[in-house]
Image: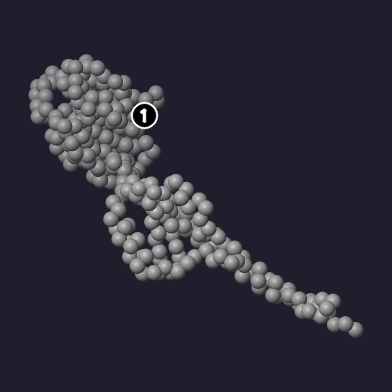
Amino acid sequence: MLLSDRNVRVNKVGVRQETTSDFHAKSNAQQKIKNQIVQMRAVKAMMEENALRVLSRTVNAKQIIHVHLMTNHSVVLSDRNDLWKDCNCWDDTKENHPYKAFTIEDLEKAQAILAGLPEISNASPSPIPSPSADASKVTCWNDNVNTVPAKMVTQTGVVDPDTLIYRLREVVCNDKCETPAGIADDTVIIYQNDDKTDCEISVDIDGDIEAWVYRGSPSQGSQWQQCWDSTENIIKKCINNGPNKGWWNGPDYGQFYETGFRPLNGEGAKHEPSSSEKP
């Protein structure tokens, strides 16, 4: 009787063939190598993308930089002209290992080149407001216009920049959204959306700049007091009789308050463009 062994097979000429365990071990090893290569390719692609953002502005189109790491891994930072199109650097066949050893000199040269490149900032040119339940945590933006008149004439007398903003704030935070007291109708620009939930009151100053107050939600309930408090903090901390602006982003949906001075019909204005040249 022949004994059956599933792990060992003998061919007709008596030569021992590969066992099942050998086959699986070899397959697992090959798969592991393939997985490592895939992972390294992903890392390489990510590093190339990040590096090219810097290099594309400073490296000549025909220059190529090799960054050699002492961990026996290579990252190639190249231009966008497909100079490495035919390179077999990532040949993963059995005879060609995808990496090669590097020297300390290679690393030092690469570090010296990269150290001389400029830093690229991804910061937004404008501050981004974040929701807060604290109406004192306002955000300020100075010199939003070149200058603002120290004194302005209204129907009820001369006012300074802060006082003018207070006039606008009065009709925005009392939820009326109408022409402020003592301000000529032909200098006032009012905006409300269709459902009357937000309000912007602007005043044309010398046909060049405008003062404005905006709220993005009704001044009702808890938001009533927050409208008064946040705009008070903006006036005191940000405007301060200067050509500035400020805002506060509240915790409720659409709750946003902004006030200050900007160019007439400037960026962010909700109202229709004004062509008035009257003070």
Q: Amino acid at mark 1?
A: Thr
Front residue of 20 and 164: 20
Question: Residue drawn 14% across and 35% down?
Answer: 242
The N terminus, quarter of image: bottom right
The residue under label 1 is 197
Q: Quadrant of residue 234?
A: top left
- Residue 171 percent coordinates (x, y): 24, 26
Query: Farthest residue in the right direction?
Result: 1
Residue at 22%, 39% in the rendered image: 141
- Residue 171 seen in this snapshot: no
For residue 275, say whether it is visible: yes
Viewer-nearest residue: 209 or 168: 209
Q: Nearer the viewer, residue 125 or 29?
A: 29
Horizontal and vertical percent position of residue 154: 13, 21
Secondary element under disc 1, as helix, strand or loop, is: loop
Vertical comparison of 252 with 25: above or below:
above
Residue plotted at (32% across, 37% down): 256
Q: Of residues 4 and 273, which is closer to you in this image?
A: 4
Q: Residue at x 66, y 73 (%)?
A: 25
Image location (x, y in percent) of residue 66? 40, 59
Residue 8, x across and y down, in percent: 77, 78
